[in-house]
């Protein structure tokens, strides 16, 4: 089977005059597919792997108006569904308001983030829902880097169902990253913007209703990317990297890193008022992604990927280059632990592993907010933007590298790997790690499965796909029992 799900989406490729981020491994697909009977290259699909792996990414439908940034590309979801030893694949655009409008117009009617500066209010920015996916109440929510709507997607058919009512009821925005406590099925989220109080924090219940939404006062507009949760607390980020507001007022886009400031993490009770948040100060850094957080006695522990500031010739922090690297999505991150003592106010932080440029972290999703020993991250290329050249498992308590794998570190482009629990799992890492891989030397696209207990063994199964899955951003895994709630 190789049917297009919607013939309106037939598109002529718009040529490759639009820069490196729309060509080669990044070039968008022009079609939507639903595929089964895929070619098994290696091993077999385990029958105790049941659920769906979803990956989001930019897939521009029309040639951009002006300069292009990966956050501008229309969101497309790629799904690998596992059922009793069978695998099916499908991909579909997220039918955002902007996407539908452009489909009707037959061209781009919006501008990208580099072309919509202050003073250009005639240029509309498109919420592309292209950045992250999270499973909640048997549905997937497609989220966007800039804080946008939450588009609800059927995780099997990939049909866009509409916008989350709860998010529309709150401020109408949700950051790219939110957390689902799979024990309570509550969704914890935040949004941020350029107007005081600059951040809000909220909770959506297992019934889909907005249960809590409170202002979080920050000293000014910030660019937080992720948050963390434990069983009782949520942890919000105030980091010393943000827009230069004078430049912004003049219509220029500039992000500054402020090494003279602290990074602050705010701990707030899950349903507590905004003013009760308690801030803890740490060394200045930027932080894209959290692996997980948990409570350990009086301590709240958060493990994440600390963006390592660029250094100048004297070994001091090069603030300008640090900010530029972050803006250009050049990742130089190390696995890091931050600890906050809720009784004494003490803090502690340490690098857990200095060896690997580790990013796009995931863990056993059932245990978000609970103590987890294992994290599954990508090896990020130090030189090629968005090239994730391998997958690696870490001990989150000690930072020990528990082994990784790459078919070809020079030519493999993996997607964000997710841990997929095996049926009747008997341990935290009893399951599989799932990722797409494009090999640009072999011009070969595969879906790779690893035994999560031993990534260094290499893929236990590899399935070929007839087309390239363009590079993207985040993924998620929704277990079969959680799919059943849809
Ligand atoms: Fe992210």
Image (cartoon, rainbow, N blue to C red):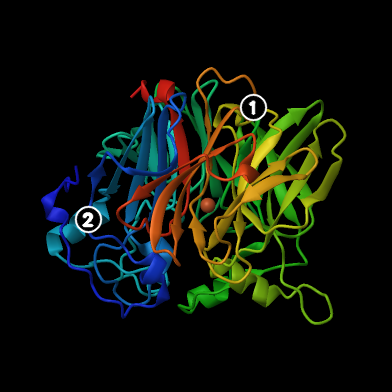
Q: Position of residue 8 (x, y in %)?
A: 12, 54
Q: How many marks?
A: 2
Considering every residue shown, the one lying at the far front of the view is 42
Identify the residue shown where x is 52% and y is 63%.
Answer: 386
Which type of secondary structure does the marked residue at label 2 adopt?
loop
Question: What is the distance, in whole Å, between disc 2 and disc 1 at their CAs?
Answer: 38 Å
Q: Residues within 10 Å of mark 2 (few under 14, many from 20)?
A: some
Which type of secondary structure does the marked residue at label 1 adopt?
loop
Q: Position of residue 237 (x, y in %)?
A: 64, 48
Q: Position of residue 210 (x, y in %)?
A: 43, 29
Residue 256, image quadrant:
bottom right
| On screen, residue 398 above or below 212 | below
Identify the residue shown where x is 44% and y is 31%.
Answer: 478
Identify the residue shown where x is 75% and y is 37%.
Answer: 301
Of 340 and 87, which appears nearest the observer? 87
Q: Is residue 172 visible?
A: no
Q: Which mark is residue 31?
A: 2
Q: Is mark 1 within 8 Å of ligand 1?
A: no
Closer to the N terminus: mark 2 or mark 1?
Answer: 2
Q: Quadrant of the C terminus?
A: top left
Q: Is residue 324 visible?
A: yes
What residue did someone put label 1 on?
428
Q: Is residue 11 left or right of residue 70?
A: left
């Amino acid at each position: 089977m190789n049917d297009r799900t919607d013939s309106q989406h037939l598109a002529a490729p718009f040529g490759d005059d639009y820069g490196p981020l729309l060509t080669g491994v990044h070039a968008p697909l022009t079609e939507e597919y639903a595929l089964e009977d895929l070619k098994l290259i290696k091993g077999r699909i385990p029958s105790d792997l049941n659920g769906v792996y979803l990956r989001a990414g930019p897939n521009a439908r029309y040639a951009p108006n002006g300069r292009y940034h990966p956050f501008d590309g229309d969101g497309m979801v790629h799904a690998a569904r596992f059922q009793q030893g069978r695998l099916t694949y499908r991909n579909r655009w997220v039918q955002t308001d902007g996407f539908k409008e452009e489909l009707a117009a037959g061209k781009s009617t919006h501008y990208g983030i580099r072309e919509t500066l202050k003073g250009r209010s005639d240029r509309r920015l498109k919420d592309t829902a292209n950045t992250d996916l999270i499973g909640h109440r048997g549905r997937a929510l497609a989220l966007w880097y800039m804080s946008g709507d939450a588009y609800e997607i059927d995780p099997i058919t990939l049909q866009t169902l509409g916008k989350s009512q709860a998010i529309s009821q709150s401020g109408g925005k949700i950051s790219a990253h939110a957390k689902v406590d799979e024990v309570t099925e509550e969704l914890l989220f935040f949004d941020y913007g350029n107007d005081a109080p600059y951040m809000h924090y909220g909770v959506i219940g297992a019934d889909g209703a907005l249960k809590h939404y409170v202002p979080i006062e920050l000293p000014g507009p910030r660019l937080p990317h992720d948050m963390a949760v434990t069983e009782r607390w949520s942890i919000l980020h105030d980091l010393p990297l943000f827009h230069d507001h004078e430049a912004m007022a003049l219509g220029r886009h500039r992000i500054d890193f402020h090494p003279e400031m602290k990074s602050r993490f705010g701990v707030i009770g899950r349903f507590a008022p905004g003013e009760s948040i308690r801030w803890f100060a740490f060394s200045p850094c930027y932080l894209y992604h959290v692996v997980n957080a948990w409570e350990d006695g009086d301590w709240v522990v958060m493990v994440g990927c600390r963006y390592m500031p660029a250094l100048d010739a004297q070994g001091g922090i090069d603030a300008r280059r640090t900010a530029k690297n972050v803006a250009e999505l050049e990742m130089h991150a190390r696995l890091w632990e931050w600890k906050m003592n809720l009784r004494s106010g003490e803090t502690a932080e340490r690098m857990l592993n200095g060896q690997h440029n580790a990013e796009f972290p995931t863990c056993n999703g059932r245990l978000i907010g609970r103590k987890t020993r294992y994290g599954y991250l990508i090896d990020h290329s130090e030189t090629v933007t968005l090239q994730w050249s391998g997958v690696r498992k870490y001990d989150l308590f000690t930072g020990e590298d528990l082994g990784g794998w790459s078919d070809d570190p020079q030519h493999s482009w993996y997607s964000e790997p997710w841990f997929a629990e095996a049926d009747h799992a008997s341990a935290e890492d009893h399951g599989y790690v799932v990722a797409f891989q494009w090999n640009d030397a072999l011009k070969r696209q595969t879906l790779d499965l690893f035994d999560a207990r031993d990534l260094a063994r290499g893929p236990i199964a590899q399935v070929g796909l007839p087309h390239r899955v363009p590079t993207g951003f985040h993924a998620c895994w929704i277990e079969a029992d959680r799919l059943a709630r849809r």
